Image (tube, coloured by chain):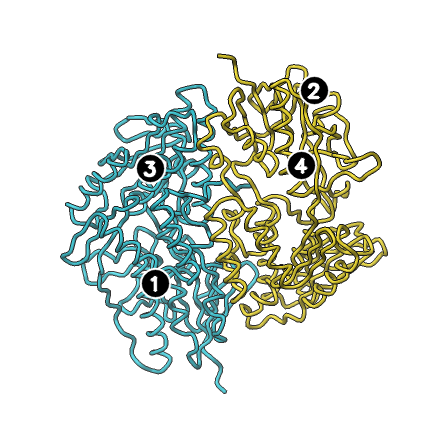
Chain colours: A yellow, B cyan
Amino acid sequence: MEKAAEIVIVGAGIGGVRAAQEFAGKPGVHVTLIDRNNYQLFPPLLYQVSTATLATGEIAFPVREFFRDCDNVDFCLGDVTGFDTKGKAVLTKDRCIPYDALIIATGSTTNFFGNENVAKHAFPMKTMQEALDIRNQLIRCLELADQESDPVRRKELLTFVCVGGGPTGVEEAGAISELIYKSMRRDYHHLDFSEVDIKILEGSPRLLAMMPEKLSEDTANLLRKKKVDVRLQTIVTDYDGHTLTLKSGEKIQAATVIWAAGVKAQPVVAALDADYDRGGRIIVNKDLSVKGLPHVYAIGDSASFVPEPGARPLATVAPVAMKQGIRCAQNILAKLEGCEPETFVYKDMGAMATIGRSSAVLATGKLQMKGFLAWSAWLWVHLIRLAGTYANVSVALKWVLNYFNNARLGRIIVER
Amino acid sequence: MEKAAEIVIVGAGIGGVRAAQEFAGKPGVHVTLIDRNNYQLFPPLLYQVSTATLATGEIAFPVREFFRDCDNVDFCLGDVTGFDTKGKAVLTKDRCIPYDALIIATGSTTNFFGNENVAKHAFPMKTMQEALDIRNQLIRCLELADQESDPVRRKELLTFVCVGGGPTGVEEAGAISELIYKSMRRDYHHLDFSEVDIKILEGSPRLLAMMPEKLSEDTANLLRKKKVDVRLQTIVTDYDGHTLTLKSGEKIQAATVIWAAGVKAQPVVAALDADYDRGGRIIVNKDLSVKGLPHVYAIGDSASFVPEPGARPLATVAPVAMKQGIRCAQNILAKLEGCEPETFVYKDMGAMATIGRSSAVLATGKLQMKGFLAWSAWLWVHLIRLAGTYANVSVALKWVLNYFNNARLGRIIVER
């Protein structure tokens, strides 16, 4: 029997798992899927964990559960430290895992654009632990404010700033507004909620830049209705944990700054010695292989894929990662069979973002929608994409409870 | 208008919350309920969090949610550091909270009986974070074993020891057996599960000492059926994180030791200058007041209540805490109205413990039961006692899923 081709996939996110699924059960290939976490995270709902609507287990699916019945896909818990592209091996702290084909699917991390003060004091929201840190911080600030007699410090504790007007910032700002005004307001007998100040700061002239301009305006108005102070063309230059400094010189006192202003590729991909874009993403060929590195592929947020000369690279969103996972795996299988790999073709299905309960904006092709119908569409799309039947049932149940009762039963602080 | 009497309750556990509920809405009293956590924990189900069946939010209820509509009960998040019994005030790091009557309901913590090595290396299971630490450890050990080529180290990683044959140790050992043999066995394609070794060590001659002897034997047999090695009259003297040493001189290699061999009162109660029993619990009068400290009461795991001269103090279990909370509050209200306080009378409803799925032991009065019926009773009793409708629905759903499908969807490692 011929030895199976060894496929190593680094990263068990949306793209990496989808690629592994494509190889599952196929003869002649064996997959090692490596991740530093033993679960696949569903990042689009991370903001609901951070605002106490969903539990960790509802947006994280054990990787091994995907491949229980697939003997040719093995999982390896580990932190990749480098790559030996000549010897064709992936390196972890204490192992060296050889490959015939390698897929980089490590996803992205928060980009503070080199601002160390901001990196030190602001809250990023890309991992499960970071979402829990934000949840603890939001609740702790209200508890501390409840005990604070100094009005200046109390105002600082009650000021929550989201930096970045993309979907993450918009959804987080809307969810914080609902957590505080709808759920937690009833919890505190003495706190004056008119002192609460939720802000969203965006550097460009509009929110949700990927949306049609009309929907960007609608989004800003919907947030304002939820008492969120929307500040456009506003750039942050510094933050020391108490004072946020804007480019205009204005200073805002805030105990909580959530940084959703940018992402970049995971730093480990720099160890590949490939070509990178400004966000540290690996520039890939039409078939998703890495220029100059035969046998190495990159997908999802690790890859910079330019559909046609002069065009912008594809966005770092879940559908791109998923479809690149499939194409990439099929190209590797094709090559193993001596066939030609195919060009990755992406059909953009549009974009959507939710702004709290009952409202969302959605743009797909020529269709633009906002309000309850867009929100229902958002719910369904996210529920269907979420892995695992239990999570589907449980998340649906929580959304129903939250819809009718503003229930946020996760508003507990658990920390070391 | 006369000033309301200030009642301070330290500890928002089962006893403390129940006492506060007794005061809620009553004229002439104002309650400050202090806890270092913003949630009430339901300890009887902690072992299910530690073994990935339940989520944190399902056994923790936000304290403020209990008292949303009770203007005379305020919550204060804080760590009590001491008591000024002469000036009648409770001290936290930065506050001094005066009281007219004080209820100590701080519960218990793990008792390592002065063994510092064990305290450093074994896993206690009294708090939410400790339960999550155990969950992370159980999963991590299997992941590491899956990558370990040294058979000695692999065996150590796959040996799980519960020390203490009370309900916590018995339930934890049974749940670990089911987590590993029923749920996780399917996850690993290469790991040899015959190398797994789960042990329960008990110093006395039988498990569940509070049960009739016949049920203790049944419990041991049920655990043995679940491949748990039951070792009675076995005393631990040392543990260094790898090697567990027994009094007999025998040594057991184990990466995971869970310590459920004893509890003691929270250390802060020692600051009261009262009389204490060997477990550090405050010796209380018949009406739950503290000897020599008028206006101070102790309940639940903080109190040592001896029903009649020569009898053993009441057990540190949830029903005692709950009923003492009620009696204590009523006695304080009676005194405020110039009436006599009443003696606390406890009717023991018996004891129960579950040994994995579908089996439990139960003893109440003359009735003894084991098997499926006892297990159903256990489920209902615990479901009803759990606070919050959502938690009830969600926990019931998970138990059903787990019953039919061995589902353990919480088996993810989330840590800093």
Q: Are marks 4 and 3 in contact (CB under 8 Å)?
A: no
Q: What is the CA distance from the residue labelled 3 to the residue labelled 2?
A: 46 Å
- Would you identify the image quadrant in which residue A140 lies? bottom right
Q: What is the CA distance from the residue labelled 4 to the residue labelled 3?
A: 39 Å
Pointer 3 residue: B177
Of badges 1 and 3, the one in the foreground is 3
Chain under disc 3: B
Q: Secondary structure at mark 2?
A: strand
Q: Are marks 1 and 4 in contact (CB under 8 Å)?
A: no
Tag shown at residue A294 = 2
Q: Are marks 3 and 2 in contact (CB under 8 Å)?
A: no
What type is the residue that disc 3 sits on?
Ser
Q: Secondary structure at mark 1?
A: loop
What type is the residue that disc 1 sits on?
Ile
Of badges 1 and 4, the one in the foreground is 4
Tag shown at residue A300 = 4
* Residue at x 37%, y 25% (from the top left corner): B192
Mark 1 and mark 4 on one chain: no
Q: What is the CA distance from the residue labelled 1 to the residue labelled 3?
A: 35 Å
- Would you identify the image quadrant in which residue A358 lies? bottom right
Chain under disc 2: A
x and y, in percent, of residue B256 in the image? 40, 34
Q: What is the CA distance from the residue labelled 2 to the residue labelled 1?
A: 70 Å
